[in-house]
Structure formats: structure tokens, C-alpha cells
Image: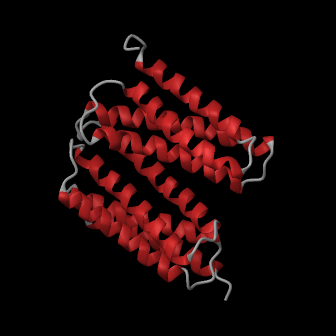
């Protein structure tokens, strides 16, 4: 196994997961109880097969989290699409590109590339993008299920906390989670909880509310990341606030009172 070139392992793992995802699209949502555990186990094993070396301590969770979340979120989100080949092929193709990117990111985080290197910056940006995307996909799914109000808010809080904690861990790539990282992860989760509570009293479409939640994660998470990385400058603050403000304006314009 160790003799197989790493990039080849990435391709093999991508093909395995993409094939399973393609097969799963031929089944209805009532089979999710079967496919979700399969995706969790297979995506974890495929990530291990792709990385293989040098996994230590907290990395057994942090390096595997995003490939698993990306896989589960894509699988569940597919059921919100009309079932046809016209949507199936582009969707599966985008997933293949995404999971391959996640393998690359996990590998870069694993080898401990210094932050000054461009490779780490690229990996961090890709990871941050997919974290925001996963936040949107899961939020959309949770809200679409029309669960109990408090249950939905709790799920969003947990989701935001976990993803934000992973985001802040990726700043230093330590082999353990610092107390400060966990605290800021909980803070972001709490802000998402508050956002969900407030937004629930506004007549918003499910996708618009999910967009709001993911935008809050992107902005608050980004500002917190810059603070932890000691790069919180006026220019960067303006950029994140501009994105948040723009999305809020769009959301306000879509409200039907």
C-alpha cells in the first residue's frame, strides 16, 4: 500500500467514493439510514488510505472531518434536486472534484507545511471555502426537514461549532486542541444559534435562511481566524463586513411580509 504513489491513492479514493455516491442517487431518501453510515466509514477509510503516513493524536479527527462532512452533505443535499441525469452527472462530477480537493487539503495539513508557504495558504483557502459550502448545504437540509424549532437550532449550533473549531485548528495545525480554539468555536456556534433564532421569526425561504447562516459563519469565522492569526487589520475587517452587509441587503429585498 505504501508503494502506491500518493496522487494515485487520491484518485483511487476519489473514484471509490464517487462511484458509491453515483449508486446512491438511484435510491430514495428512505435508504439514507444505510448510505450515511457507509459514507462515513468509507470516506474515513479512503482519507486514511490517501494520507496514510504521519497521522497523530487529534489529527485522527481533524484530518478526516472535512472529507466526511463534504461527502455526507453532498449525499443528503442531492435529494433536494429533481432526480434526473441532467442534474446527476454535473452533481457527481462536482463532488469528485471536491473530494479530491479535500484529500489534497488533508494531506497538506498532515505534512505540516509552514504557514509562510503558498501551498498552505492555498490549502487553507480551499478548506475555508468548502467549510462555508458545507455549512450552507447542511443548513439548507436541516431547515428543509422542518424539524422541531429547538432541534433545528441545536443542530445548527453543533454544526457551526464543529466546523469553526476545525477552521481555527487549521491556523496552527497543532496535535491537540487549545482551549482558546474550542472557546472561539463555541462562540461562532452561539452566534449562528442566535442568528437562526432571529431569522426564524422572519418569513425567509429555506435557501435564503441557509445562505444567511453560512454567510454569518464565513464572516464571523473569518474575522475570528484573522484575530487568532494576528492579522486583523481594517482592510480585512471591511472585506468581511462588506460581504455580510451585501448578503443582508439581498436577504432583506427577498422578504415577503
Q: How is the model colour-coded?
A: secondary structure
Name the residue nearer the viewer: 42 or 237: 42
Name the residue nearer the viewer: 193 or 31: 31
Instruction: Name the residue furthest top.
Output: 3
Instruction: Name the residue furthest front.
Output: 33
Q: Where is residue 92 in the image (x, y as percent from the top left)?
A: 66, 38
Residue 204 found in image quarter = bottom right
Observer able to see residue 43: yes
Q: Is residue 20 left or right of residue 7?
A: right
Residue 236 found in image quarter = bottom left
Q: In this view, does 13 lie to the left or right of 91?
A: left
Quarter occupied by the C terminus: bottom right
Residue at (70%, 35%) from the top-left corner? 23
Q: Position of residue 32 (x, y in %)?
A: 64, 48
Q: Where is residue 98 in the image (x, y as percent from the top left)?
A: 53, 39
Residue 66 found in image quarter = top left
Count the marks: how many? 0
Residue at (67%, 50%) from the top-left corner? 78
Quarter occupied by the N terminus: top left
Q: In this view, does 210 lie to the left or right of 223?
A: right
Relative to 8, say whether 230 is above or below: below
Q: Where is residue 153 in the image (x, y as percent from the top left)?
A: 48, 72
Relative to 243, say whether 37 is above or below: above
Observer able to see residue 218: no
Residue at (53%, 80%) from the top-left corner? 199
Relative to 215, say whether 77 is above or below: above
Residue at (26%, 36%) from the top-left corner? 117
Amino acid at each position: 500500500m505504501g508503494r502506491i504513489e500518493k496522487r494515485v491513492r487520491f484518485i483511487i479514493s476519489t473514484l471509490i467514493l464517487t462511484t458509491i455516491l453515483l449508486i446512491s442517487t438511484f435510491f430514495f431518501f428512505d435508504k439514507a439510514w444505510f448510505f450515511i453510515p457507509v459514507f462515513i466509514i468509507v470516506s474515513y477509510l479512503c482519507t486514511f488510505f490517501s494520507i496514510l503516513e504521519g497521522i497523530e493524536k487529534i489529527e485522527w479527527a481533524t484530518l478526516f472531518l472535512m472529507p466526511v462532512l463534504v461527502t455526507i452533505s453532498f449525499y443528503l443535499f442531492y435529494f433536494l434536486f429533481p432526480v434526473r441525469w441532467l442534474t446527476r452527472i454535473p452533481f457527481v462530477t462536482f463532488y469528485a472534484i471536491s473530494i479530491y480537493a479535500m484529500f489534497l487539503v488533508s494531506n497538506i495539513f498532515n505534512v505540516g507545511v509552514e504557514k509562510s508557504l503558498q501551498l498552505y495558504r492555498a490549502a487553507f483557502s480551499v478548506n475555508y471555502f468548502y467549510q462555508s459550502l458545507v455549512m450552507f448545504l447542511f443548513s439548507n437540509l436541516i431547515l428543509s426537514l422542518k424539524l422541531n424549532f429547538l432541534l433545528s437550532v441545536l443542530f445548527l449550533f453543533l454544526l457551526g461549532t464543529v466546523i469553526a473549531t476545525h477552521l481555527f485548528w487549521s491556523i496552527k495545525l497543532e496535535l491537540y486542541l487549545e482551549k482558546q480554539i474550542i472557546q472561539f468555536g463555541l462562540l461562532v456556534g452561539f452566534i449562528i444559534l442566535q442568528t437562526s433564532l432571529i431569522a426564524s421569526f422572519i418569513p425567509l425561504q429555506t435557501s435564503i435562511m441557509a445562505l444567511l447562516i453560512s454567510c454569518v459563519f464565513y464572516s464571523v469565522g473569518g474575522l475570528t481566524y484573522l484575530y487568532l492569526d494576528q492579522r486583523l487589520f481594517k482592510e480585512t475587517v471591511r472585506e468581511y463586513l462588506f460581504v455580510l452587509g451585501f448578503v443582508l441587503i439581498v436577504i432583506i429585498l427577498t422578504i415577503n411580509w
